[in-house]
Image (cartoon, rainbow, N blue to C red):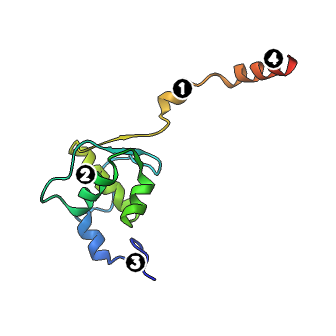
Amino acid sequence: MKRPGRDDDPDRLYTVTGGRSRSGTDAFDLVTLVVSECEPTPGMQSEHASILRICRSPTAVVEIASDLGLPVSIVRILLGDLHAAGRITARHPRTAAAADQLPDPEILKQVLVGLRNL
């Protein structure tokens, strides 16, 4: 049984990424949510067009890779292309700024102790 992505011809993957082996950005990890900002255009690379269709609603990078049957590393390169062109937006479900806004764990412990004492 052929496994998409893993058993693909290396020449095809080389062609899909334009010979690049790394994305120009670290903006995409496995759970980054990607949303299309436009529809595919005629003449667009088929993988780029597929990503735009898949991401009409927020979709995680790992889901995109699964849907395309491509390795995540290849999908990250393609997403970098689309992001640079303004065709997608990307958002991590939990940014570092959001983590800074979480309550102090010590305060949460004190609240828990207070609730137990009720």
Give residue 112's position: percent from left, percent from top: 78, 23
Question: Does label 2 or label 3 sit earlier along the sequence?
Answer: 3
| Left or right of residue 105, residue 47 in this image | left
Identify the residue position indicated by label 1 in the image.
Answer: 100
Q: Amino acid at mark 2?
A: Asp
Question: Does label 1 or label 3 sit earlier along the sequence?
Answer: 3
Q: Amino acid at mark 1?
A: Asp
Give residue 54's position: percent from left, percent from top: 33, 54
Identify the residue position indicated by label 2 in the image.
Answer: 81
Secondary structure found at label 1: helix
C-alpha gap between disc 4 and disc 3: 58 Å
Using the rendered view, name the quadrant where residue 9 is placed.
Answer: bottom left
Q: Is residue 14 above or below residue 55?
A: below
| Left or right of residue 14, residue 102 in this image | right
Q: Is residue 25 above or below residue 106?
A: below
C-alpha gap between disc 4 and disc 2: 52 Å
Count neighbours of disc 1 (C-alpha within 10 A) and say few if under 14, some if 14 to 19, many if 20 or more: few
Give residue 47's position: percent from left, percent from top: 27, 61
